[in-house]
Amino acid sequence: PRPVKSVVRLRGVPASEQRSSFTYHDPCQRHSASLKAAGTSITEPASNKHLSANTTDASQIDSKDIEQDDLLSRIGSTKIQIGASITYLTSAITLAKLNLLGPYTDTLLYRDLGATVFSTVAAFILVKSLTKLSTDGIVEARDSRKIIHTLCAPSFLVVWPLFSDVYGARFFAGFVAGLQGLRLWLAGTRRGGSDGNELAGAISRSGNSKEALGGPFIYTLILFSSIMLFFTDNLTGVIALSSMAAGDGMADIVGRRFGKNNKWPFSSSKSIAGSLAFIVFSSLCAIGLGTWLQYTGTISTVYSFGEMTSKIVFISFASAMVELLPFGDDNWNVPLAAAALSMLLLP
C-alpha cells in the first residue's frame, strides 16, 4: 500500500496540537493510534482474547496427546522386550535343565544367569550413557554412532570370563546381543517411544530412525552369530568382532579427522589414515582381548604370544583392504573376511 496522509480532528484537543501522520495501516489502526495519542484507552476486542486462549488450549492439548502417545509407545516397547526376554531365557533354562545344552549343574546355571543379567544391565547403561552424550550435544551424532560401534562388542567380550565353560553358555551370552537387536528393531520401526528415538538418533547418520535397521542392526546380528558359532572355542570370534568394532569404527573416526589430504587414488571416501587406524586398533583390540581371555582361562590356544600377534596383524591388514572395497556393507564384509582368515591361520 502507498502512504496516505490523514488528518484526524479530535474534539477537545487544541488545533495547534492536531497532527498529520503518514501510515501504512488501515483506517481502524490509524484511528486507534490517534485515540491513544489523545489519551483515550482502547480495549482489545473480546474475540482476540478468545482466539489467543483457544490457541493456547490447543497447544496444551497437542502436547498432552504427544506425551500420552510417547508413554503408550514406551509401555508397548517395554512389554515386547520383557515378553521376548522371558520366552528366550525360559527356553534356555529348560534346555539346560534337560542337559541338552551340556552338562549343566544348578551352580553353573546360576552362574550363567547371573552373568547374563549383569551383562545386560551393563550393556544398557553403556549404550544409554553414550546416547545421552549425543542428545545433550556433548558429542556429535556422527561421532557417538562410531563410538558406540567401537566400544559395544569389545566391552562385552571383556566380561566373557563371567560365563561358564559349558557349551550352552553361548545361548545365555547370545541373549545380550539379541536383546540389543530387538531394541534397535523397535527404534527403527518407531515403536520404542522417546527412548527409541533417542537411540536411533545417536546411531544414525541423518537422524532417520530407519537407519537403525541398517548397519547397527547388522552389527548385532554379527555379534549374535559370532557368539553362537565361536564364542570361547577359539580366537575366531574375537578377531572378527575386533575387526568389525574397533577396526572399522576407528577407521571412520580417524579418517574423517586426518584423512582429508591422503585419500586413496581409487576411493574418494577412504583414506590412508583411516586404513592405518583400522590395522592398528583392530590389532590392538584383538591382541588385548585374546590375551585377557587366555589369561582368565576362558580361551585356550596352542600359539605363542609372538605367533598370535603376527597373525592377528596380518588378518587386520587383510581386513582393512576388504574395508576399501566399493561394494557391500562393512558390517558384513569385514567380520566375514576376518573370521575366514582366523579359521585358516588360527584354527
Image (cartoon, rainbow, N blue to C red):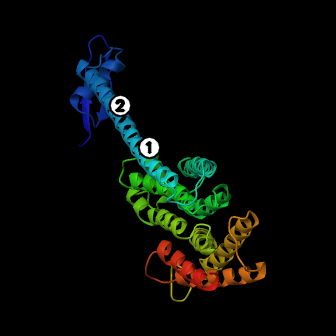
**In this orientation, which residue lies closer to the viewer: 245 or 204?**
245
Mark 1: give few (<14), some (14-19) or many (20+) Cα within 10 Å: few
Q: Classify 245 as above or below 328.
A: above
From the image, tell me which residue sits under label 2: 64
Q: Classify 70 as above or below 241.
A: above
Q: Position of residue 307 (x, y in %)?
A: 74, 83
In this view, the residue farthest toward the top is: 12
Q: Secondary structure at mark 2?
A: helix
For image coordinates 32% across by 21% down, the residue present is 18
Quick one: label 2 or label 1, which is nearer the N terminus? 2
Identify residue type, mark 1.
Ile
In this view, the residue farthest toward the bottom is: 265
**Residue 82 numbered tag:** 1
Image quadrant occupied by the N terminus: top left
For image coordinates 62% across by 52% down, the residue present is 108
Identify residue type, mark 2.
Lys
For image coordinates 58% across by 70% down, the residue present is 241
Side of 30 where 141 appears, left or right = right
Image quadrant occupied by the C terminus: bottom right
For image coordinates 39% across by 36% down, the residue present is 71
Q: Is residue 320 visible?
A: no
